[in-house]
Image: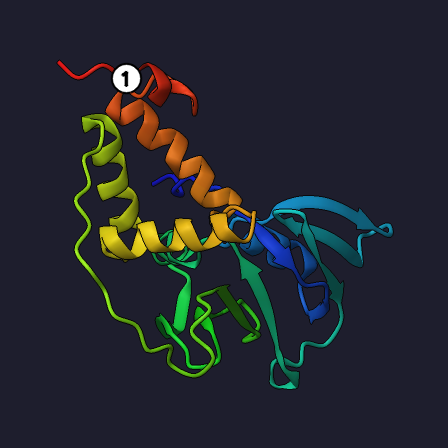
Amino acid sequence: MANPTPPFIECEKTQTCLAVSDLAAAIEFYVTKLGFQFGFTFGEPAVFAGLNLGNVGIFLKEAASAPSAGAVFFTVGDADALYEFHRANGVEVVEEIGDREFGMRDYVVKDLYGYRLIFGHNIYNVGPPIRIERVDVPVRLEKRLAGLLKDLAEHKRMSVGSCLEEMLLHTNEGVGPHTTSTLRYIEELKKKHGIDYDSHGSYRFVEE
């Protein structure tokens, strides 16, 4: 049975080196099971390897493994998509995915040697509550845009209103609210809903 295709993987940061007792087996596991891309090996026979997850690398060194020495944390664009890929690939999940009080949504897996690998994305829930009052605002949207917004909010596990609030808050700061992973998903939604106009299309909208 073929391994599932890895999702688009956006990883912001991490760099570490892990000791593994069988370099070839470790490379195969990281590439075929965890979705890493092969980078290079060093030595003849190989004793050192470099692998990549997105634009961030990890090094493997053939030596006595020490899984109790610590863990590696990968900050990615969409932890949920990667979690489903790892589960489908039979990777051992030791902590299920969930929102953490320190501002991350993450989960933990183990590799062949017992190393704990943590994959998560930011959820920005750290800080004191902000007391607000919500009001109803009459909104009329182009039908295809409304469908995209509904799907996007569901993808981000938000209500439509909360999704709009997030966009407006980011607009206030002059920045976009979406990661590269989310922008790629929006491109899929544009195709799904047949949105064939650009950001200036609203100036030419005529209701039927």
Disc 1 crowd, CA 10 A, few/some/many (<14, 14-19, 20+)? few
Which of the colour schemes (rainbow, by chain, secondary structure, one colour) is used?
A: rainbow
Is residue 119 shown to the viewer in this render? yes
Residue 6 falls left or right of residue 67? left
Q: Secondary structure at mark 1?
A: loop
**Looking at this rendering, what residue extends furthest in the right direction?**
43
Left or right, 30 with respect to 88, comes to right
Image position, residue 14 (x, y; %): 68, 63
Task: Residue lying at the far left in this picture: please name it.
Answer: 208
Quadrant in which the C terminus appears: top left
Residue drawn at (32%, 49%) of the image: 164
Name the residue tied to disc 1: 205
Nearest the camera: 114 or 121?
121
Q: Is residue 173 left or right of residue 139?
A: right
Question: Which residue is nearer to you in this view: 10 or 37?
Answer: 10
Q: Quadrant of the N terminus?
A: top left
Q: Looking at the image, which is closer to me, 116 or 127?
A: 127
Residue 73: image quadrant is: bottom right
Find residue 60 and report its horizontal and vertical position in percent.
Answer: 72, 62
Q: Is residue 134 above or below residue 206?
A: below
Specify the amino acid type for callout 1: Phe
Residue 6 showing in the rendered view = no
162 vs 178, left or right, is left
Which quadrant of the view contains residue 7? top left
Task: State the image quarter where residue 23 is shown.
Answer: bottom right
> In this view of the protein, which residue sits in the foreground, 97 or 21?
97
Task: Give the vertical position of 140 relative to 101 (above or below).
Answer: above
Residue 181 on image: x %, y %: 47, 44
Q: Residue at x 46, y 78 (%)?
A: 126
Residue 57 % position (x, y): 70, 54
Residue at figure coordinates x 35%, y 72% from the top left: 98
